[in-house]
Amino acid sequence: MLHKALTYFVNHSFFDFIRKLVFTISQWLTFSFYRKFRGLFHLKSYNVKLGQHVKISGFATNLLIGKDIQFYDACKIELSHTSNLQIGNRVLFSYGVVLCCRNKITIGSNVQIGEYTSIRDATHNYKGEHNIIMNNDDLVGEVEIGNNVWIGRNCLIAPGAKIGNGVVIGANSIVKGVLEDNGVYAGNPIKKIRNT
């Protein structure tokens, strides 16, 4: 009787546990490899950490990606063959950030971007020659984000925005034009509140 119980335990419980453990580890390794491969395939860098459900569409040939880049869960990256995307070292894109590069976006080092922020270098042209807005060509402009910048939650960085070094941007702000170095900015329209 004891022999049968031990045989059952060895054949079922222990080996079921081992099988589940091996299956879980293999799934984790496969998923981890897949995310690394996507970072290499789309962004040409092993130094990019992609969270879950990060969507990357399009391909660009002109990319310069630094070290320690993190895209948290549910980020969206849109690229095209004309994209010129440059990202420095230690840049964090929090949950749900949208990065849409049609022309040129430059992001410095030591930058943190709050969740649900949208960084775009193109927008719809509503004054084009066509009556239907969606048939017009997009308006494009370069976006520059300096070093040591903190962009708060749910901001819009519009085409042509130039954000200096050491800038802090408050949540829910719409960023257009030039923001000078070492300032705290917030609002819509965005205004300088004080120096950092």
Image (cartoon, helix red, strand yellow):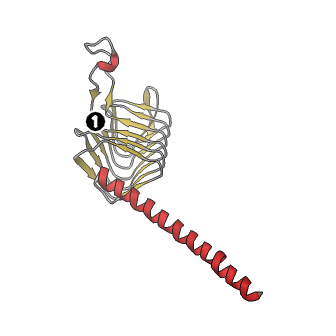
| Residue 81: quarter of image | top left
The residue shown at (33%, 14%) is 132
Q: Nearer the viewer, residue 131 or 31?
A: 31
Instruction: Identify whether 1 is placed above or below 174.
Output: below
Q: Amino acid at mark 1?
A: Arg
The C terminus lies in which quarter of the figure?
top left
Q: Residue furthest top?
A: 131
Instruction: Identify whether 29 is placed above or below 13.
Output: above
Report helix, strand or loop for mark 1: loop
> Left or right: where does residue 41 sit relative to residue 62?
right
Q: Position of residue 110 (x, y in %)?
A: 38, 53
Q: Position of residue 156 (x, y in %)?
A: 42, 33
Q: Position of residue 113 (x, y in %)?
A: 43, 45
Instruction: Identify whether 22 is placed above or below 139.
Output: below
The residue shown at (50%, 68%) is 25
Q: Nearer the viewer, residue 71 or 53?
A: 53
Circle 1 is placed at which residue position?
102
How many discs appear? 1
Circle 1 Cα neighbour tier, 10 Å, few/some/many (<14 / 14–19 / ≥20): many
Q: Position of residue 158 (x, y in %)?
A: 36, 31
> Left or right: where does residue 101 sit relative to residue 27?
left
Q: Nearer the viewer, residue 62 or 174?
A: 62
| Residue 56: quarter of image | top left
> Left or right: where does residue 95 sit relative to residue 10?
left
The residue shown at (57%, 69%) is 20
The N terminus lies in which quarter of the figure?
bottom right
Q: Residue furthest right?
A: 1
